[in-house]
Image (cartoon, grey):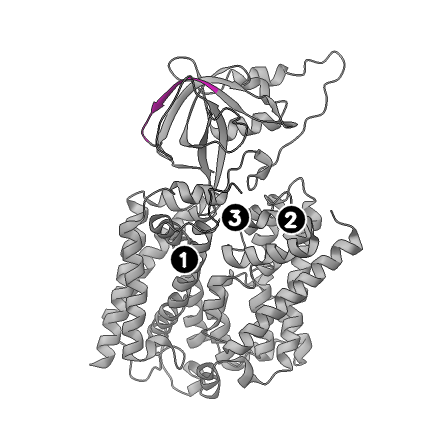
Amino acid sequence: MPDDISWFTFNFQDFSFAFLSILFEGVPFLLLGTLMSGLIDQFLPARLMTSLLPRNAYAGAAVSGLLGIVFPMCECGVVPVIRRLIAKGLPASNAIAYMLAAPILNPVVALSTYAAFRGQSPEVMTAFRLALGYGVAVLAGFAVHNLALRTVLKPSILADIAQPRGLDTGRSGGVGFRLAAALQVSVSDFLDMMVYFTMGCAAAALFSTAVNQEIIAPLAVDPWLATASMMGLAAILSLCSTSDAFIAATFVSFPQVSKLAFLVFGPMVDLKLIFIYTSVFRKRFLAGLVIGLFVVIGLICVRLQVIFLVP
Amino acid sequence: MTAALHRLLSSSVLMVWGSVLCWVYFSGKISAYLHPSFRIYTAIAGCVLVLLAFLLMMFPADERADTSGCEGSMVGSLPGHLLATLVLIGPLLLAVMSSPDQFGASTVLNRGYVESVAELPGVVVNVPEPALPGEEATQESASVSEYLARNEKGEIRAEVIDLLYAAQEPSMRPDFEDKSIEIIGQVMPAQSANADGSRFNLVRMFMVCCAADARPAAVTVQPPGEVDFPQMTWVKISGKATFPMVDGRRIPVVEATDVQKTDPPEELFIY
């Protein structure tokens, strides 16, 4: 980096420009997720999900991790959906597995990853991304199964589980009544999530415009540093999982495994997601989840380099 | 009374957001923010939000329905709802009022120039098979160059990314090498291949999804004399495309014969 270029240069207009572009890209997906959450609230019987999934908690988490193939959701849209599903009685372990896996293990992401890595072993990268994303999500689900719910979920969500609403309260109503109620739940969820999303977008825009990205370049030479820095970068950039592969593929000087870490960690943890997650999870649990995912994904990726001698 | 106020606040936020999204889309400003494939979703979301705002006002919650969102939700209490309304409307409107339709020089410098096509997202460079004995290696590309768009002076209308491709792909290079070209971009200081300090970089932002991920693709320009444009000025350059080897790497250098300030193109980004 030339001496006359600072590592941090804030320009409010550039910040506004990047902030709006992330908002405009993400809002449609968040809206879709909250519309679905309203419909789930009013039309999905509480025990339907639990009756369809295996009774065994581990098998349930394993199957939930695959649901993204059938119900693909981006990382922004999936949070309001799982918040509502948890309130409907879906075990938190299953919800976490679905929440973490769905933004990765879905057809759109598979295709975009394959396309982005043309010329860089696309089959291997796509297969590893999907497999590692699924494996880590299910592992997180297993871990959550062994925790007390009160340590995982915010008291407000626990209160919702204790007092199920919609179809389960025994109140009756026609389709029109439920649609109106679903609309209002959706709006309430949308506004709630948008507060966190807006703050996350601001943080991501700040880093993407003000921080000189050359500061990470020297990290590419060491696999540990490269992997850690690429995961950190994924969290800062807060990219959509459908398109992040196109960005990751451009880090040509970084080892493949560090790009894999970027592609698996980013859809699970990023700045805007951390804000959104705080609407569902306790802060202490969230900190543990973020650190746990960082360590597990990092270790696996570095280990993969040793096993497969991936350059 | 409180319920009506909640409804009014929610409806106002939805209406503001919906109106902004619709305005950004239908005014064409959306092209500065998003890749073409994402733009339509903004319009749909805007229309849905406006519709939701109307429906929310027209159909108040039935008393039998518990529709307050999750317990403890920020919008559940009136003070929280007021705060959420401020957070959701204030920064949006402030950003809309202050946002330009392109990045300034500091962000371009922070992101670093992309001077090799292999570093551009989603770009694949195919190295062609060597020509067989007796085969005309450049025959195909020579015919391709016939179809390249030209200006009224007969100069090839090139994009920054075309020259980056040509530097990397031997089969494409003859289409541009030593040919007269016209190219548009923004002026930025050259940070490499500029020993005597006379060169500058011509930059176009390459977008994958949204402006936040755009990367500055750059080619080096050797001007005919001293040029003194402020950073990020849009210029139209006429000159000759060359591809010298610098530090073991082939780079595109435009030997300019004319550098003129120009209006920004319709699409500020390249995709």
The reply to whether the magenta stretch includes residue B18 is no
Q: Chain of mark 1?
A: A
In this rendering, do the residues under marks 3 and 1 share a single chain?
yes
Label the magenta part by its dominant secondary structure. strand
Looking at the image, can residue B136 be seen?
yes
Query: Residue placed at 26% from the left, 67% from the top?
Result: B11
Query: Residue placed at 44% from the left, 67% from the top?
Result: A36
Looking at the image, is mark 3 or mark 2 earlier in the sequence?
Answer: 3
Q: Chain of mark 3?
A: A
Looking at the image, is mark 3 or mark 1 earlier in the sequence?
Answer: 1
The reply to whether the magenta stretch includes residue B261 is yes
**Is B136 on the left or on the right of B182, as rendered?**
right
10 Å crowding of disc 2: few (<14), some (14-19), many (20+): some
Name the residue type under label 2. Answer: Ala
The picture places residue A249, in percent across and down from the top left corner, at: 60, 45
Q: Which mark is residue A220?
A: 2
Q: Nearer the viewer, residue A87 or A168?
A: A87
Q: Secondary structure at mark 3?
A: helix
10 Å crowding of disc 3: few (<14), some (14-19), many (20+): some
Q: Secondary structure at mark 2?
A: helix
Q: How far is the residue under mark 3 from the one under mark 1?
A: 29 Å
What residue range appears in magenta? Answer: B255-263
The picture places residue B155, in percent across and down from the top left corner, at: 44, 15
Name the residue type under label 1. Answer: Pro
As drawn, A79 above or below B212: below
Q: Quick check: marks 3 and 1 in contact, CB under 8 Å? A: no
Q: Which mark is residue A28?
A: 1
**Is B205 on the left or on the right of A301, as rendered?**
left
Looking at the image, is mark 2 or mark 1 earlier in the sequence?
Answer: 1
Name the residue type under label 3. Answer: Gln
Q: Which residue is mark 3?
A: A213
